[in-house]
Amino acid sequence: MTAPPEEEIRSALASVLLKDGDDDEGVVDGIDGELSSRMLLLIGDIVSYLAGMLHEGGLDDVEESIGPFLEGYGCDDDLVKACGAAVMECASDGGKDGGQTVTNGSNNDARSGSGAVRLKQGIVSMSSALTDQSEAEMDANRYMWGQDNKIAAMTNQAKEAHDSTVSAKDKRKARKELEAARREYEAKMAMLQAEEDGDAGKASVSNMVIPDYQSGRNEKDIHVRNVSLSLDNGTPLLDDGELKFSHKRRYGLVGKNGVGKTTLLKAIAAFEVEKMPRHHRILHVRQEIRAAGGDISVLKAVMDADVERNQLIEEEKELLHRLEGEEGKDEEDVSGAAVKEKLAKLKSKSKDGANGPDAGFNSDLKRLDEVYERLKILGSDSAESRASTILSGLQFTPSMQSGPTSALSGGWRMRVALAAALFIEPDLLMLDEPTNHLDLEAVLWLESYLQSYRHTLIVVSHDRSFLNEVTTDTIEFKKRKLTYYKGDYDTYVRTSEENVKNAARVYQAYQDKRAHMMEFIDKFRASASRAKLVQSRVKTVEKMDLEAPEPVVVEQLWRFSIPNPEPLGRPIISIDDVWFDYVPVEDGIAKGKNNWILQQVNFGVDLDSRIGILGPNGAGKSTLLNLIMDHLTPGKGSISRNGNLRIGHFTQHSADKFKLELSAVENMLNLFEGAEDQAMRSFLGKFQIQGTDALKPMMMLSGGQKSRVAFSSLAYQRPHVIIMDEPTNHLDMESIDALVEAVKDFRGGLIVVSHDQHFITHTCGELWVVGEGKVARFRGDFNDYKKETLTRTAKRVAESVKNLSSINK
């Protein structure tokens, strides 16, 4: 059957899909109103798809071909059948009239119009994203096909191939994938919102499932075979894996972002892994907490997080009430001496009974003894001092510990969640990026604390130095498999690289031996005198192929560069006798100079500066950076900057400046006026944001991908000085290594605030410490600073616990 012109197919579809049969107006019949405008844009895609199908003569499955496309936009079965019938009738009429397809230089479908210099604003339409041309592409196209001087375009196979690089079927597939990704994102956001609503007013730590101590043989190691894991949409993450966690070992779980590390930890914590031993206390601390906090104090929030301890205390009260009556109703003391005294009295009471011991009384007494024994194991009598010690180590001052959790920022509430997990001290503690919201001082204390953790620990972290200090073993999550290595992260890297080299040598030896045998076989295949020998070699090669080692694929390391700026004359940035405070005057009275946040600061920045800014949260690090960037004005003193200076600023929240409903390309074009679409796509590709990732809404990108877009916007500015505030948050190891190499090669100034020890030691040449109003250069290397900080933290923790003890007395 001869294919009709595309315009006739358009009319046939419009007569069914549009009430008024008009391409420009009307509502699509059988489709929600909000989708109608999208369907108008998509008719051109249906036309292109059907025209190609009709040219090939495949008219037997029209409904099957267009069905998924229309159903994806809400069309019902009747509408699909009507569209198929209209197309068939159109094709039949076209055959009678001898119709033929007309090809000319213009595009008549719904997407026609002048080529867009920029991408459309708003949600990306994959069809337009894959077909719209930038001005540069149009110029190149005109030159290629001889249209510069208004010469008529040549209609030939080469041009058709150029215009049809993406088929309608592929565009339909890409559009469906985009819609599926959007639905998945919306479902994820709804789930996070539900978790947020459920966590309101709590300590913001994942709920721990109460263990069943009657199950199992009380073994402390965990060994589960044949573990499989997949997402809700069926995507497999782990196939036939094996969980092997030995008591008192500390594991680092490593793998690329998105491989399924967090999903695995959640499944373990919820006992969703089949055959997981249920007699262990297991707790997973999430990477991000969204709860708003409550009115209870921080100290009480941490203590209340131990659900099992709380239940045992409530059960103790009920048992005492039954055993002692009104006498023990209000007693709260569960110290060792008080417990022994209570039990002695109750046992004496049981023996002195006139009618002999009551069965219910003895049963309650036995259960009370078990409750006290379990509370002793949980360290209930020292709960308050332990909670205070942990909070002090995480930089909570006494006043913060007694204040409400609702007064804390999101970062400090994450510390409350971490403190609660450490206080609970589960048999298996799983920490997901625990350092993301900590300053360097808190990270160093946490390292020291976890090194002596009494149970099993699993840590997911992007901080290489933290993993080296804490872990004894490493688990690699890759290609849906778990591989176990002895040693810390650096040991794992060396072992893994050596394994790859050994595997490559084995595979190369196999290839060389096979090539040598095949050379002999090819040379003497026709020789009758050597036929037996050739046959023997053929069988040997066949056997070798059956037992051949896997080919070794060496992954290419991702690297990017930050363009070097042009030279500038000194001084680049000069800070002279600067004083600053946000509230220099309180109630009409000038604040004492010794209480200002920054006092008499003096230092400078050049193009060869590599400065690491250290100090606890709240010391004034961010304030200093804002002064340098001219976001704040000094109260006294001066800050001079070169008139041609360009400062690039990157923070852990830099991705928040983007409009997430737009694509990476659209956001970059909005930030940099005059930039070309195709040039921006190429630039983003250097940061591994390419293909559909560059065109899909940024809400669908991972945290690491959003950070890479932020890095690309930083590099596009070609700054003279880069200021980084926690740049490694949300980046995986590969991205951090790439960032380290890029910063090393950058020929400009650098100022870094980071808790990542590896990043600081490999990018910064000098350290400046902010604290107690002063900004001073540290005379020593990072290890010296680390030792000094740990000593200072230990003294503060001891003093905090001492103050708590004196208050309780």
Image (cartoon, rainbow, N blue to C red):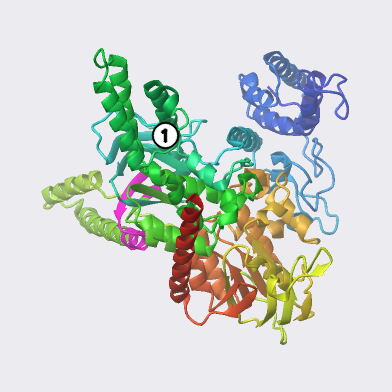
Q: Secondary structure at mark 1?
A: helix
Q: Residue at x 67, y 15 (%)?
A: 77
User: Compared to 636, does 794 lie above or below?
Assistant: above
Quadrant placement of the N terminus? top right
Number of marks in the rendered image = 1
Identified by mark 1, the residue type is: Glu
Query: Residue 717's quadrant in the figure?
Result: bottom right
Q: Is residue 481 magenta?
A: yes
Pick whichever, 545 or 477, lies toward us. Answer: 477
Q: Report the side of 294 relative to 418 (left or right).
A: right
Residue 354 appears in the figure: yes
**Mark 1 crowd level (few <14, some 14–19, many ≥20, 10 Å Cα):** some
Q: Residue at x 35, y 45 (%)?
A: 482
Q: Which residue is denoted by mark 1 in the rendering?
A: 308
Q: Is residue 728 magenta?
A: no
Pick whichever, 205 or 567, lies toward us. Answer: 205
Q: Report the side of 97 relative to 521 (left or right).
A: right
Pick whichever, 602 or 757, lies toward us. Answer: 602
Residue 733 appears in the figure: no
User: Compared to 530, does 37 lie above or below?
Assistant: above
Picture coordinates of residue 73, whole percent (x, y): 70, 26
Picture coordinates of residue 234, whole percent (x, y): 48, 31
Picture coordinates of residue 289, whole percent (x, y): 57, 44
Q: Which contiguous range is marked in magenta?
A: 476-497
